[in-house]
Image (cartoon, helix red, strand yellow):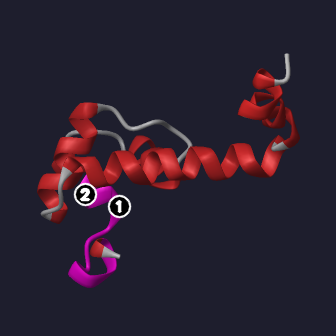
């Protein structure tokens, strides 16, 4: 969204951040987990709090797990523990 609005390419932003554009693409698409250095760069660039980017990452990870196999986590229901 920021890149389109500012008419900046991923390649230009990656160069500005001091990384390969393929690495930046992996961060932006969720294929690579964010680290604190990248989070600080992105949050400074977008003028948002770093916590926002970590929440986005966690939300994406949970969504991915939910799509894969939510039944696997049903065994962790507190009622099952209490019934033991």
Q: Mark 1 points at which residue?
A: 10
Q: Is residue 53 above or below residue 6?
A: above
Question: Would you identify the image quadrant in which residue 46 lies?
Answer: bottom left
In the figure, is residue 32 to the left or right of 24? right
Quadrant into which the N terminus falls: bottom left
Say if 19 sits above or below 44 in the image: above
Find residue 20 and report its horizontal and vertical position in percent: 35, 41
Q: Quadrant of residue 35?
A: top left
* Vertical side of 56 occupied by 74: above or below: above
As drawn, which residue projects farthest toward the bottom? 5
Q: Name the residue under label 2.
A: 13
- Front residue of this view, candidates 21 and 42: 42
Q: How crowded is mark 1: few (under 14 residues within 10 Å), some or many (20 or more)?
A: some
State the image coordinates of residue 81 (x, y, percent, origin top left).
77, 22
Query: Dot 2 lies on which element?
Result: helix
Kind of element beneath mark 1: helix
Contact between labelled residues 2 and 1, with CB atoms less than 8 Å apart: yes
Q: In this view, does 22 lie to the left or right of 35?
A: right
Residue lying at 26% horizontally and 80% vertically, measured from the top left: 7
Identified at 83% across, 29% down, the residue is 75
C-alpha span from label 1 to label 2: 5 Å
Quick check: 42 left or right of 54? left
Mark 2 Cα shell of 10 Å, populated few (<14), some (14-19), many (≥20): some
Q: Where, quadrant-wise, is the C terminus in this rendering?
A: top right
Residue 53 place in picture, x, y as percent? 33, 51
Q: Residue 50, position in %: x, y?
A: 21, 48
Q: Nearer the viewer, residue 51 or 13?
A: 51
10 in magenta: yes
The quadrant holding residue 77 is top right
Residue 70's label in the rendered image is none
**Magenta-drawn segment:** 3-14
Q: Nearer the viewer, residue 58 or 26?
A: 58
């Amino acid at each position: 969204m920021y890149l389109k609005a500012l008419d900046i390419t991923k390649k230009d932003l990656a160069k500005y951040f001091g990384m390969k554009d393929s690495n930046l693409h992996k961060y932006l698409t969720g294929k690579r987990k964010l680290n604190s250095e990248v989070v600080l760069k992105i949050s400074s660039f977008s003028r948002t709090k770093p916590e926002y980017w970590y929440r986005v990452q966690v939300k994406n990870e949970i969504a991915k797990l939910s799509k894969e196999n939510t039944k696997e986590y049903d065994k962790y229901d507190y009622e099952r523990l209490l019934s033991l």
